[in-house]
Image (cartoon, rainbow, N blue to C red):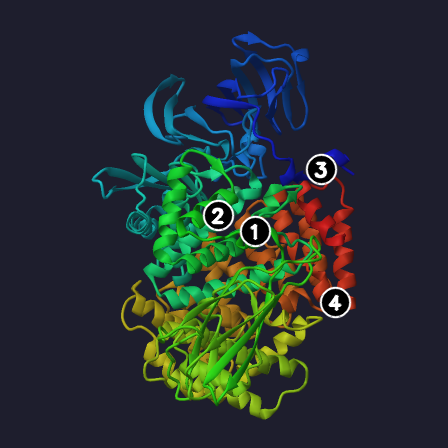
Amino acid sequence: MTDQKQRKAVKLSDYEPPAFEVETVDLHFQLTEDCARVRTRMHLHRADGVDLHEPLHLHGEALELEALYLDGQPLAMDDFLLTRQGLSIERVPDRFELEVHTLLRPQDNTSLSGLYRSGGNFCTQCEAEGFRRITYFPDRPDVLSRFTTTIEADRQRYPVLLSNGDLVDSGDAGEGRHWVKWVDPWPKPSYLFALVAGDLHCHQDTYRTRSGRDVQLEFYVEHENANRTGHAMESLKKAMRWDEDTYGLEYDLDTYMVVAVGDFNMGAMENKGLNIFNTQYVLASPETATDADFEAVEAVIGHEYFHNYTGNRVTCRDWFQLSLKEGLTVFREQQFSEDMGSPAVQRIQQVRLLRSAQFPEDASPMAHPVRPESYVEINNFYTATVYIKGAEVIRMYHTLLGDAVFRQGVKRYLERFDGQAVTIEDFRQTLAETGGRDLGQFGRWYSQTGTPRVRVRDEFDPARGRYTLHISQSCPPTPDQAEKKPFHIPVAVGLLGRDGQALSLRLSGESVAEGTTRVLELTGSEQQFTFEGLAERPVPSLLRGFSAPVILEYDYDDDDLAFLLAHDNDPFARWEAGQQLALRVILRRVQGQASPNDSRQVIQAFQQVLEAPDLDPSLAAEALALPQEAYLAQHMDPADPVAIRAAREALRTELAQALASQWRDTYRRYRPEGPWRLDADHIAGRRLANLALGYLGATGAAEDNGLVQQQYHRADNMTDSLAALALLADREDEAAVTALDDFYQRWRQTPLVLDKWFRVQAMSRHPRVVERVQALVQHPDFDLRNPNRVRAVIGAFAQGNPAAFHDDSGTGYRLLAAHVIRLDAINPQVAARMALPLSKWQRYDASRQKMMKNELQRIADAPSLSNDVYEVVSRSLE
Ligand code: PHE
Ligand code: ZN
């Protein structure tokens, strides 16, 4: 057991402003093959009103302290107190200079936090608390300082030396070494510091801002990836233009640099002027990246760029406020993606992700509010709740205030708090003030955990032509909160006439009908809303555009759903109707209550979508995809992932066979002709054709199986190649073995593509997939030190293949636990993330619960567990 003190929770209610401010930090890095030496000189002063006797505390972890000087005087060992968490000096003047010399070992740093090595280069990751692994420092987001960085390294091995801000000087350091000096003019918290040293290819371009300044854009990648940065560069330029056009925000340095590294714990990092990215979100070429990868690159490039204001210029006071920057930046990223592509498709994909990743989290022992109140390890709170539920909360502000007022509010927030570290409350107050509205109750979205249920009941009074919606809300208790108060929920609704036309809406008290969508504001636990002037009972279209992150309950019958799928003028609601219809049919089948009529109705509805004269191929591809297994499981208690898989597959097979000729037609018609292009038409065509191919893979007809093989072998792009490979990986025949082997031979030297090879196998519906995964973790190319590879195998299996992971034998659970324990010694952050599927044990039957808890206990009992994994398993077992 590790000492109890180390496990102490940090609480929001304990927040205290910093006692000392750091005006300037001057860092000097000396990088060598076996260690790095860092000399830090900083100017500090006591904050206003802080007691003279208040000691100075600096964070520091995994460091060797070599020397310490206060105002030029060396400090002796008994002048300060050194612990595993940091250093304190009892008596310091009001203003002073501190110089700290530390020694670190980046080559042994497998946690990928602080200064570490990736592919022979040096790089850093400082968010949230990595800077304290570089030097002793008040490593908290509300200490903002001006940074100067000098880097000295071997010239041949590390020709490229980068840090934040502007390059101001460079020179020769003798003995084949060189040095450079960077100055960042913008004060920033330490979590935004970055350094890179390596032998890297640079793709350069320029961007002219709307005020006419030229900004240098630079992408740094390993030489073999030199030809895969074009899309990221174009995406960056689009993002810069978009932020100027939409929010009036212009870039504020002369250079914007992005470095891609193969070993990275997360997606990417918004360090000031020097983003560091997981290669996954930079590199893209048609042979190696799917359309979805191209889109993800654009979105993540946008996300990190948008942080330059929402995150960097205005940052967080403390880590409880993480969603202040992340929720807002994800929302801005979503708006950007909607503007670059199809808003409806984007919205559908956002909701799919929310339901498959955030809803389960909100119903698990790890549930926490968008603004958490305590944590043991902050790295465990970079979650779907903070990021994507946080973005949904921002979207609701946008819905309630309207686009123009919302944008004005964001601008005012950025102006008012420029250069400061602030709170979620500061943001809410600025928006409320801008909109002239009381958003007090709205604050509960930040403090209350759990997914609210919104129940709708309706009644029609034919004599008076009045239609009334009774809307109520409730929120189930969560481990942290037994009782919830009502939320402020925007419920967007429309009404359809029996002819399928959207009706103009007039609420009681209004004189004229206006618009076909209305946002009803639910603030009480139960309210009614009455529409007037209706000739007949309408079909309600509820929660249009998914206007709030809630679970909607309304007793539609199957015919209503089919009707909405055919007619609803809100594309999200239309898609949702089809999903609900399929969901019901699958669940009835799981319960052994399926009637032949059930599948007939889904088949008919799907056929209508396929044969619609105005078919939009990318929307159709969303409508024709069955609900995900993870979402289906939320509607079953206890969830039986094996039965869900079987029922979903059975319906898929029926759809495949009943509509075989339509799938074949669709495949032929929409598969793009000629060479690969990344335009909307080709992307949509590939998406629909590959969806059709997916169904064809399930018809069982030799001709269709042949088509899958043919596509694999003839594809000139990764989208088509991988779509076919994934279908082949479900099979056990010779063709499957040949294709997998071919893919491996072709791509074994290309890590991001090899990840795909691992992932399709870990996620396959192959009957002996568990055995396969056991073989994959023994594969010479499997490497626990590389997070992308770990996610491609362990993550894909445990999160992306529920029927296999929850195999009755418990083998899946054992495999996961064993790897969490091994990985914890290497990379605690990633290990803790991998452990999460086990935390959801409550959702399953007694036998699975027991096995899952046993594995959690086995992890909990492992010696010298990290705080990260400790927090996940201990909360799960509470
Ligand atoms: N702040 C990064 C982002 O969302 C995510 C991140 C967190 C990266 C922690 C690394 C470490 O853009
Ligand atoms: Zn972010």
Secondary structure under the numbered disc 3 in the rendered image: loop
Q: Nearer the viewer, mark 4 or mark 2?
A: 2
**Residue identified by numbered label 3:** 8
Three-letter residue code for mark 2 = Arg
* Badge number at residue 428: 2
Q: Position of residue 844 (x, y in %)?
A: 72, 67
Secondary structure under the numbered disc 2 in the rendered image: helix
- Cβ of mark 1 under 8 Å from ligand 2: the answer is no
Three-letter residue code for mark 4 = Ser
Three-letter residue code for mark 3 = Lys
Residue at 37% x, 39% y: name it.
415
* Badge number at residue 446: 1
Tell me how far mark 3 sits from mark 2, CA to CA.
Answer: 30 Å
Compare marks 2 and 1 and give the one earlier in the sequence: 2
* Badge number at residue 809: 4
Dot 1, how many residues are within 10 Å of its Cα: few (below 14), some (14-19), or many (20+)?
A: many
Give the quadrant of residue 401: bottom left
Compare marks 4 and 2 and give the one earlier in the sequence: 2
Contact flag, marks 3 and 2 (Cβ < 8 Å):
no
Question: 512 and 286: which one is in front?
Answer: 512
Compare marks 4 and 3 and give the one earlier in the sequence: 3
Q: Nearer the viewer, mark 3 or mark 2?
A: 2
Q: Nearer the viewer, mark 3 or mark 1?
A: 1
Tell me how far mark 3 sits from mark 1, CA to CA.
Answer: 23 Å
